[in-house]
Amino acid sequence: MQTQTVLAELFPNQLEYHIDNWVIRGSAETKVGKVEIIGTVDSAAINHAIAMTLANEVLKVIAEGKKTPIVFIVDTQGQDSSRADELLCLNRTFAHLAACVDLLRRNEHPNLAIILGEAVSGGFLSYGLMANQIFALQSSQVKVMDLNAMSRVTKIPLEKLQSLSQTSAIFAPGVENFYKMGAVDDIWVQLDEHLVANAIESQQSHLDDFLIDKRRHVAKERDGRLLCNEVVEAVLSA
């Protein structure tokens, strides 16, 4: 589904935005007031320039002091794999972007991420996965990496990974598996103007709850991460 179509369905009132170098920036009116729109489109490969642009836009909203909600639009194939970006420590730029989103949360801005297309690896983690809540279109593609790449990196045979992915969500790409792992709060099938507003309205009544990451507990409830809590408790008590 095209970005323009999705945004028009989610934000039918006073929607305005522009796209430059894969970065989308805009705003819209909802029943809970104005929301700012920040993110990436067209399966962006996020490099230093894109990451810094996103970070700067987040900081501008915080600096206004109005606690305006932010809707992050996610459509990224992951980090730019160019040698130049790696040599310039793209991981540190991603850490800066993630810290800006965390600052947004600590300054009591409601925020959520919407996965429109792809959500892959560090490109997703650096801002989309940092949001208070993450929602995904049913047609979206969410993954750390595909199983072929995972096999090359881990040296685990592809056939073994394919077998594991049938019974364990942590080995399998796909929006349904990320829902089971607690990384996606809900999968949106039908789009309308109430989805974003309802999410923001719900957040406003308990923003402090989002200062603690409870996704591992959600994942256990959804049978997505069966041993995570036990391992964490064992490490903490060691």
Image (cartoon, rainbow, N blue to C red):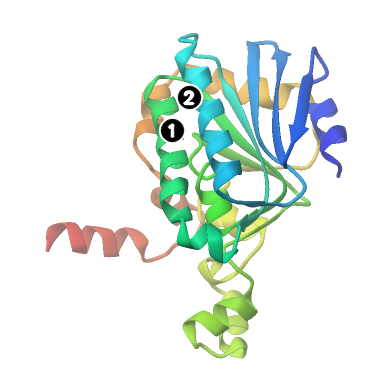
| Tag 2: amino acid | Leu
Q: Is residue 138 left or right of residue 186?
A: right
Instruction: Give residue 96's position: percent from left, percent from top.
Output: 42, 41
| Tag 1: amino acid | Cys
Q: Secondary structure at mark 2?
A: helix
Q: Secondary structure at mark 1?
A: helix
* Residue 96, above or below 225: above
Q: Which residue is mark 1?
A: 100
Instruction: Give residue 108's position: percent from left, percent from top.
Output: 42, 19
Residue found 76% across the figure and 33% down from its top: 19
Tell which of 223 and 35 is nearer to you.
Answer: 35
Instruction: Give residue 52's position: percent from left, percent from top.
Output: 53, 38
The quarter holding residue 37 reads top right
Res. 11 mark: none
From this viewpoint, is residue 64 visible?
A: yes
Mark 2 vs mark 1, CA separation in Å: 7 Å
* Image quadrant in which the N terminus is located: top right
Q: Residues within 10 Å of mark 1 (few under 14, many from 20)?
A: many
The quarter holding residue 161 reads bottom right
Residue found 39% across the figure and 49% down from its top: 217
* Residue 104, above or below 122: above
From this viewpoint, is residue 183 visible?
A: no
**Label tally:** 2
Q: Is residue 114 left or right of residue 124?
A: right
Residue found 39% across the figure and 28% down from its top: 103
Residue found 64% across the figure and 80% down from its top: 148
Q: Which residue is mark 2?
A: 59
Q: Are marks 2 and 1 in contact (CB under 8 Å)?
A: yes
